[in-house]
Image (cartoon, coloured by chain):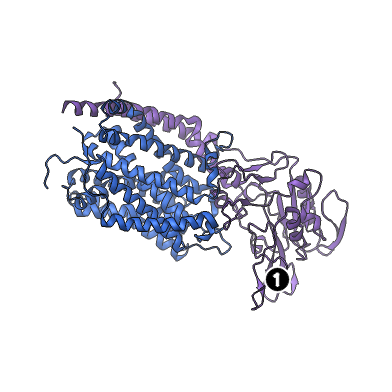
Chain colours: A blue, B purple
Amino acid sequence: MSDNKALGGKIITKPFIILAILAGIAGILLIKRFIFGIGAVTNLSDGYPWGMWIVYDVLIGTALGCGGYVMAILVYVMNKGQYHPLVRPAVLTSVFGYTLAGFSIFIDVGRYWQLYNVFLPWHANLNSIMFEVAFCVATYVLVLWIEFTPAFLEKFNKTKLLGFMNKILFVFIAIGVLLPTMHQSSLGTLMIIAGNKLSVLWQTAWLPLLFLISSILMGYAVVVFESLYSSIGFKRPLETPILSKIGKLMAWLVAIYLVFRFGDLIWRGELGTIFNDGWVNGTMFTVENLLFIIPMLLLFSKDKRSNAKVQFIAAVLLLLAGAVYRFDAFLVGFDPGQGWHYWPSASELLITLGIISMELMAYLAFVKWLPVLPNIKHSTS
Amino acid sequence: MSIDRRDFFKVISAGAVTAATAGSVFAREKKKLSPDAVGILFDATACIGCKLCEVGCKEYNDMPVEQSYKVGDLDVPTIWDNADDLSAKTLNKIKLYRNGDASVKDRAENGYAFVKKACMHCVDPDCVSACPVTALVKDPVTGVVTYDAKACIGCRYCQVACPFNIPKFEWDDPFPEIVKCQMCDHVTETGGIPGCCYYCPTGASLYGKVEDLMEEAHKRIALTEGEKYQYPVKSLTDGETAQHTVPKYVNYIYGEKETGGTQYMIISAVPFHELGLPRLPEKSAAGKSETLQHTIYKGLIAPGALLAGLLVAAYRGNKSHNETEKGG
């Protein structure tokens, strides 16, 4: 008996069609991008060479895809078997989060037809943080699909192959924890080389640790969000007690994060910079950290975190916190000087929206078609 | 399997401690200038703003004319090149500094000055450290930073990294490249000198060995204001000179220390930050970035230990799960 079960039902529904239209619009804009160049659809410039696509689709997209990673830590490393039913839906979000981040990279890089150079040893630059990120992310996409294969094998009743996969799966689970630990931290390290161009409020040698902890937080927040959302959306019982335990874990992670975030600012004597780094930086810094602090306070209270509504609010706030932190560290706090400015164009936003739509469509199709969501033992419907 | 979770954390922390203690020892050494490195000395006080260097640059590098402005309100394109700043079509650019009534040259207050923007060819270039596929390379002998489109994936991390915002990207091309000054290495390798220096009539842009140029720069800033001095033109070894009256130099050579030193150096009578040159630390950001990365990944000990621990944990976790599944 498996932990997970396909939902069944029609795949083509009204929301699915709306998402398909959004994906279609993005598709048309992408044709424009590939014919006329990146400048034809984006507001990117030589001063702001990275924008919406890198920060949202890649940085935030992969952090949202950390569900599989953090659940693997909980279930296999900490050996908390009771969370096992949540692993497969989490891995599925990771599969899509990372696959589409890879797809976005393909759109964003100028010379996509040469992307394979990253894998050619004579081209590799081991000093480059980008090399580590590119190599690890690409490998992890592959590992995630392998981790997800049991769902396919169960669907098609390949019992023998499934038995074999289950025996060797531990190798991929281990690699599947190692790789995100490496690249989620390195995504933060990327900005070290930007030096003075990044405001001191974000430029710190602790960038890798802050990015790693916040990605783990976002991973757990996604698991909580997804569990509550699919409970409501697909009319399934709530998993409140398990989510409450995850909530406590998240509260402690935020506390550790904030100790490093503010400890570092105090240590460098830059805490006052919050008030004299321009109102945009100051405001965004405040918003970013309130988004961490408020859910932490909610989740430290045992009563509050046992409430599904609070769990949901806390998860959403933490997802926003990690997202705002990434926007701040890569765009808001980034100033190349010489009067450069950046604000994403409509086309840029529509392409991002289209990619998110594709992700949601694939998720909806997969949970209905494959054994992904936890099997309900005491059915209520 | 007898390893439990406590042992697992022991393995992990052993790796972490090894990595952390290795850190201080592993700080990357400062990059040194090659003795045969070549560069350009730009003397802002000798520049008359004629922009012949821009013409020379376009000609030598076969770059297109760029028009940022049209004639008046007529919306008629001009026939000449009038780029606003560096771009994928313009590799060097004379910029004007002006203050107040701009009556006197080379004076910060109520004065004006010219400065030339181009790749600084850093001794420890951030762009080279940043490039994931070694498309940007620093020549071990000449120190010139060159670009190889065949390697480039177009990720633009070099643009994020460069403290001078030098690498430019062809935004409106479906098959874009990164574009930057390569110090006319196609000409210098056969004994020629870069286009900007060859065309400069006053010696404001001067080509030579970095060591010799540095000596020349130190000599100039030590000269007394008002005296006559024979300024070498084109290159230090060319023999051609032009006589100028010595201005009141700022006692500083921009590029001697900035971000670990640059092979394109600037001297001026107007403070450098007024000319739009960034204030930069003596240590390159590349050094910090590489030190951090190689501390974490030294000999792959920490990731290796982590993987070993994870394999053990995942093996046990997976096994116990499979067993309960069979049993239940």
Which residue appears at 73% of the width and 63% of the height? Answer: B269
User: In the rendered image, which residue does mark 1 sit on?
Assistant: B78
Which residue is nearer to you in this view: A16 or A317? A16
- Subunit bearing disc 1: B
Q: Residue furthest top?
A: B1
The image position of residue B316, as x and y in percent, is 28, 26
Which residue is nearer to you in this view: A61 or A295? A61
Q: How many marks?
A: 1
Q: Is residue B272 left or right of residue A339?
A: right
The image position of residue A39, as x and y in percent, is 54, 59
The image position of residue B44, as x and y in percent, is 74, 61
Query: Residue B36 sits in which quadrant?
Result: top right
Quarter that holds the N terminus of chain A: top left
Give, as a three-letter code, the residue at label 1: Thr
Query: Residue B115 sits in which quadrant?
Result: bottom right
Q: Residue furthest bottom?
A: B73
Residue B248 visible in the snapshot? yes
Q: A305 above or below A345?
A: above
Which residue appears at 76% of the width and 53% of the height? Answer: B60
Which residue appears at 71% of the width and 71% of the height? Answer: B111
Q: A246 above or below A154?
A: below
Q: Is residue B68 left or right of residue A306?
A: right
- SS label for mark 1: loop
Q: Residues within 10 Å of mark 1 (few under 14, many from 20)?
A: some
The image position of residue B184, as x and y in percent, is 74, 49
Residue A48 visible in the snapshot? no
